[in-house]
Amino acid sequence: MEQTGSGLSLKLFIVLSRAHKVISEQANRLFAEHGLNPTEFAVLELIYHKGRQPIQKVGGKILLASGSMTYVIDKLERRGFLSRTVCDTDRRVTFVDITEEGRRLMAEIFPLHERNLHELMSALDDDEKRTAIELMKKLGLSIKDLSS
């Protein structure tokens, strides 16, 4: 008998959770090989691709609490991957930027990460990936609407 309703929703949750777990484990292994945790990589990746950002905005963009954000940025700054600059016009705002050393690290890691994800997702063809993206967006947006 084919599942429907709440049983099917539970099955989808389990399948999504397991897929996320195995994909994340594989991606995180690459970060660890380069001495980074997933959050550190996410911060570096954001700034590498988007450029200088106010620290206050970084946490929101990678879904991290501000207290944790300060800790992660402190660690990356100590390692020479990021630098901070206080805003000239508003002393309450501090910008974080990637250093040359951070840029070199990301230039090495990011292509490996992209290739790794492509291999991990290779069970799906391009049309299936587009469909999955649209379905996950639809699901995420509907949940956001429910919680408003």
Image (cartoon, rainbow, N blue to C red):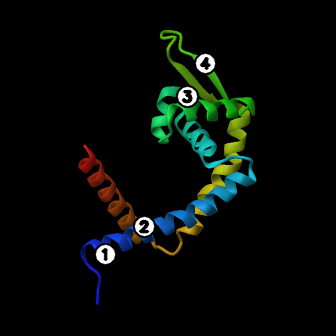
Camera-near label (3 vs 4) is 4
Camera-near label (1 vs 2) is 1
Q: Nearer the N terminus, badge 4 or badge 2?
A: 4
Q: Nearer the N terminus, badge 1 or badge 3?
A: 1
Residue on which the image places disc 3? 52
The residue closer to the viewer here, 13 or 32, is 13
Q: Secondary structure at mark 4?
A: strand
Q: Secondary structure at mark 1?
A: helix
- Give me the C-alpha separation between circle 4 and circle 2: 40 Å
- Give me the C-alpha separation between circle 1 and circle 2: 25 Å
Q: Nearer the N terminus, badge 1 or badge 2?
A: 1
Question: Residue at the location (63% across, 42% down)?
Answer: 40
The amino acid beneath tag 1 is: Gly
Residue 129, image x, y percentages: 42, 67
**Image mark for residue 7:** 1
- Give me the C-alpha separation between circle 4 and circle 1: 52 Å
The amino acid beneath tag 2 is: Lys
- Give me the C-alpha separation between circle 3 and circle 4: 10 Å
Badge 3 vs badge 2, beta-carbon distance below 8 Å: no
Q: Is residue 135 left or right of residue 83?
A: left
Q: Is residue 139 left or right of residue 16?
A: left
Residue on which the image places disc 4? 85
